[in-house]
Image (tube, rainbow, N blue to C red):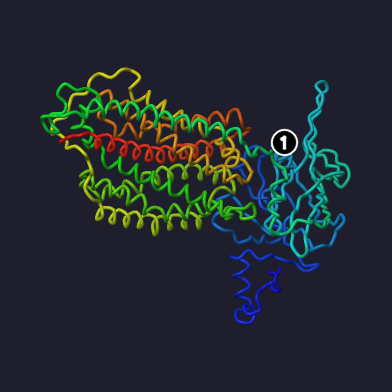
Amino acid sequence: MQCGIGHLPGGCKRTMGLHCVLILCLFSGWVVGYKQGENVTLYVNKVGPYHNPQETYHYYTLPVCRPEKVHHKSLSLGEVLDGDRMAESLYYIRFRENVEKKTLCKLTLSEKQVDELREAIEELFYFEFVLDDIPIWGFVGYIEESGFLPHSHKVGLWTHLDFNIEYNGDSVIFANVSVKDVKPVPLEEGAGAAVGVVGVGGGSLTVTHTYSVRWFESPLPHARRSERLRDYSFFPKTLEIHWLSIINSLVLVVLLLGFVIIILMRVLKNDFARYNVEEEGGCDDLDQGDNGWKIIHTDVFRFPPYKSLLCAVLGVGAQFLTLATGIIFMALLGMFNVHRHGAINSAAIVLYALTSCVSGYVSCSFYTQINGQRWVWNIILTSSLFSAPLFLTWSVVNSIHWWSGSTQALPATTVLLILGAWVLVGFPLTVIGGIVGKNRAGSFQAPCRTRNIARQIPTQPWYKHTAVHMAIGGFLPFSAISVELYYIFATVWGREHYTLYGILLCVFAILLSVGACISVALTYFLLSGEDHRWWWRSVLSTGSTGLFIFVYSVFYYRNRSSMSGLVQSTEFFGYSLLTAMVFSLMLGSVSFWASLAFIRYIYRSLKMD
């Protein structure tokens, strides 16, 4: 395989030669080309149940044709995290050379191996090959259920595969595998009778595997070959441009913004007109004869309990907000196409480590402003607030994958690499960000001073309790993203490649806007009841969206997917819990800063001489 050297600048070829070619191939997107008759390597990757996307096993765990010595392909971090374990195969494919029914190998299957194949076929095992970074999918065998009385249950093994490969010029555009007009080899229980290419003897079966290769010219250029893969449908297609859901979410945002800006500001205008009168006393005398949010002006900026934990939540939430924004913009720049296996996983790990400085800075800066003293403990808490639950969840999930022999179990080298990224990059950046935030933190800007003795909070009606605010503050942001959430789940817990990143950016902006608006409205209602405990309430109200997302994940598992089994279920619910935690931290941080800005605005607007 070569890399289109004829297309490179002449100066580049003269000065840097092969090194320049390799660099441009890897980073500049030059077309990877083949010569006529050149070998095109086909890698076998993994197999697994059709309905359990994260339960995958190495292809060579099945009794199939395999070389005497298996050579694995070097994989990126993202590919390993995605469960890929590519290895060279016995398929010999030459560029633009057709092959008709070439023998791959002959296998003598024991009774146990036949039972293994039967079990895999009955669980709808599919296989994944990779040809020039193009995934190729197909089923291991064939199963047929027919009749009631008598009942017929037939299981067959595909022993012949037809590879259909499209090309344009010297590059591969698309490839798939077909079993059309191919008769499956029946696998009877206990290695029973056989037909066709199967021989019977002594409780064993002799199977001959064959394959054909056909090349077809395609008008699609190499730069657009991802479109061809996107339109191919081996797995169920659910992603589409869903304008109705986007319009529904936009209408919700407009209504919420109208509620906050028009109704709430009109109420505030009346409050300001009533409160801003000539006062003979100072700021401490404003509460004489008044009620509502003005009367608690000497308590509203009273620092909350568990200051270190609150600041850690705000810091990690700001980190995930930065991380999510970075991932979406990288996707919009085309850095995550369908041919870059696991690229988004690698980017998420790198960005998580690099954005650790954001969490340290935000947490320690605000902790210093609210008179926190144990800033070292605050940095440790910030760095472990999400990483500790992540490590615990991963340990359980990875142990189950390792016990079942799944390729989703990470090798020791990958575990050490990720751990090293956190120890050598993530944690030090958190410490550096915390030190910078502590040194650059100013004083807490409070329009009113706080009394030493807190005012007694009157009894609140039921609709102002924390649980009610959490239900309202969590449901409305969730309803704004519920439709898009289905497509995200279909991508993460399915096999589709998400490509609607422009819509995702809109929905992400809608989510943050709705969360901020709801938080401001609920905070106002809380202060109107003379309750000054808004600090944690503002975080919990919109942060409860994560609970709704986890409940939706349970609904998706039971009603929208066919996933089953210990391996798949453990991974699904474990990482769904982490996803809910990420949304809670991110939205809790956004709602807190929105509420703080709102409170500073209304109390600064009062005339307190």
55 versus 95 height, above or below: above
Residue 161 is situated, as x and y percent measured from the top left of the image, at: 80, 50
Quick one: quadrant of the N terminus?
bottom right
Residue 3 is situated, as x and y percent measured from the top left of the image, at: 68, 69
The picture quadrant where one finds residue 33 is: bottom right
- In percent of the image, x 42 and y 28: which residue is there? 259
Tell me the element at label 1: helix
Give left or right: position of 143 versus 369. right
> Which residue is more in the foreground, 609 or 412?
609
For label 1, count other residues whose C-alpha is less than 10 Å away and answer few (under 14), some (14-19) or many (20+). some
Q: Amino acid at mark 1?
A: Glu
586 versus 433 height, above or below: above
Q: How many marks?
A: 1
Quick one: quadrant of the C terminus?
top left
> Which residue is more in the foreground, 445 or 43?
445
Residue bearing the label numbered 1: 122
The picture quadrant where one finds residue 453 is: top left
Give left or right: position of 478 versus 91. left
- In percent of the image, x 62 and y 39: which residue is there? 52
- In percent of the image, x 28 and y 34: which residue is there? 602
